[in-house]
């Protein structure tokens, strides 16, 4: 059985699409379809079902992919044995939310590590759902997710369903952020009805059906990059965004943004660390995790 086909199947599971998986794997779609069919024939059961809404994993397929993921992990570990100096490399592999404070903590870790040893840093900013997928497929060793507290049970159930380990890191408040010359800053005792005439800027890759269904109507601008969000906010007087309260004043000043203190609305977020069961953190990763706990 070709273990390369395991990687192909894991990518199809990740994207729910043969076409997207083929693009990500830089291979032709017919070749990927042929490889998946060959793998299913060797196994004697279907891993995926093709539907009008995309590719879904069968119950047996889900069980197989757990084993396949472990096989890929073991192969990766065996390959590392061939690098005699691999233990000298300072590794840090993490998928995180779009959050300036996280970047600042990673910079602090970089300033603390041994500068005489080589480093291997893999740092990705993404949505919570993509981060879970990144850790599940072992594209990243650990993930830091942040979501509205009202969706806590959904995410915890989803993490458990994917058989990942997790640590609850804490929670905090979201603040409304606007430009210094925004019309919104002059409103007293801001409530939902007073915000309804303004445009909310938010991330467009919240690919959780439950969350999508709960979105309220109103003007929205969807972005996929934090800098784009800040630039839109700073350049318009009719937009606002909900941002974590631990964003630094330095960042706000850089983009001519302010927090609104006169807000009756309250939104809370939760931070959760996720990783594969039995995964052993590298020294650099452990320092990062400790810095998060120290902050809270």
Image (cartoon, grey):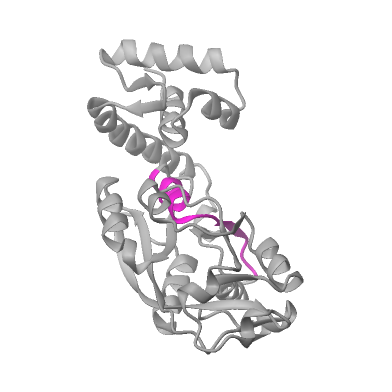
Please tell me which residue is depicted at 36% across the width and 56% down the height of the picture: 275
Please tell me which residue is depicted at 67% across the width and 71% down the height of the picture: 238
Using residue 205 as the reference point, say whether residue 67 is left or right of it: left
- Whether 173 is among the magenta residues is no
**Image location of residue 50, percent across then percent down:** 38, 19
Please tell me which residue is depicted at 52% across the width and 60% down the height of the picture: 92
Q: Residue furthest right?
A: 235
Q: How many marks?
A: 0
**Which quadrant holds residue 260?**
bottom right
Quadrant of the drawing holding the N terminus: top left
Q: Compared with residue 7, is residue 93 higher up or lower down, i.e. above or below? A: below
**Image location of residue 296, percent across then percent down:** 39, 83
The reply to whether residue 277 is visible in this rendering is no
**Which quadrant holds residue 170?**
bottom left
Q: Compared with residue 249, is residue 205 higher up or lower down, i.e. above or below? A: above
**Image location of residue 293, percent across then percent down:** 39, 79
Which residue is nearer to you in this view: 24 or 16?
Answer: 16
The reply to whether residue 199 is visible in this rendering is yes
**Image location of residue 214, percent across then percent down:** 38, 55
Q: Compared with residue 139, is residue 291 higher up or lower down, i.e. above or below? A: below
**Which quadrant holds residue 153?**
bottom left
Which residue is nearer to you in this view: 138 or 19?
Answer: 19
Q: Where are the magenta residues, as a range?
A: 116-136
């Amino acid at each position: 059985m070709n273990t390369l086909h395991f990687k192909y199947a894991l990518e199809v599971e990740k994207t729910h699409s043969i076409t997207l998986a083929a693009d990500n794997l830089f291979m032709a779609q017919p070749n990927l379809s042929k490889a998946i069919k060959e793998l299913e024939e060797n196994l004697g059961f279907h891993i995926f079902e093709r539907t009008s809404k995309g590719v879904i994993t069968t119950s047996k397929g889900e069980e197989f992919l757990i084993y396949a993921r472990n096989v890929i992990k073991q192969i990766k570990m065996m390959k590392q044995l061939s690098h005699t100096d691999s233990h000298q490399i300072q590794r840090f592999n993490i998928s995180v939310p779009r959050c300036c404070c996280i970047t600042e903590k990673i910079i602090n870790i970089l300033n603390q590590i041994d500068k005489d040893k080589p480093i291997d840093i893999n740092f990705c900013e993404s949505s919570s759902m993509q981060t879970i997928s990144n850790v599940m497929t072992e594209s990243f060793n650990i993930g830091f997710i942040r979501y509205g507290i009202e969706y806590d049970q959904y995410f915890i159930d989803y993490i458990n369903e994917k058989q990942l380990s997790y640590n609850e890191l804490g929670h905090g408040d979201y603040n409304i952020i606007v430009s210094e010359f925004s019309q919104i800053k002059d409103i007293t005792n801001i409530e939902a009805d007073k915000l309804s005439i303004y445009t909310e800027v938010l991330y467009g890759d919240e690919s959780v059906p439950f969350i999508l269904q709960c979105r309220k109507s109103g003007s929205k601008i969807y972005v996929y990059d934090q800098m784009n969000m800040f630039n839109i906010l700073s350049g318009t007087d009719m937009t606002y965004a909900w941002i974590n309260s631990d964003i630094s004043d330095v960042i706000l000043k850089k983009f001519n943004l302010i927090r609104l203190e006169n807000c009756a609305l309250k939104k809370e977020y939760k931070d959760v660390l996720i990783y594969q069961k039995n995964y052993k953190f590298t020294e650099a990763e452990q320092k990062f995790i400790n810095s998060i706990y120290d902050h809270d």
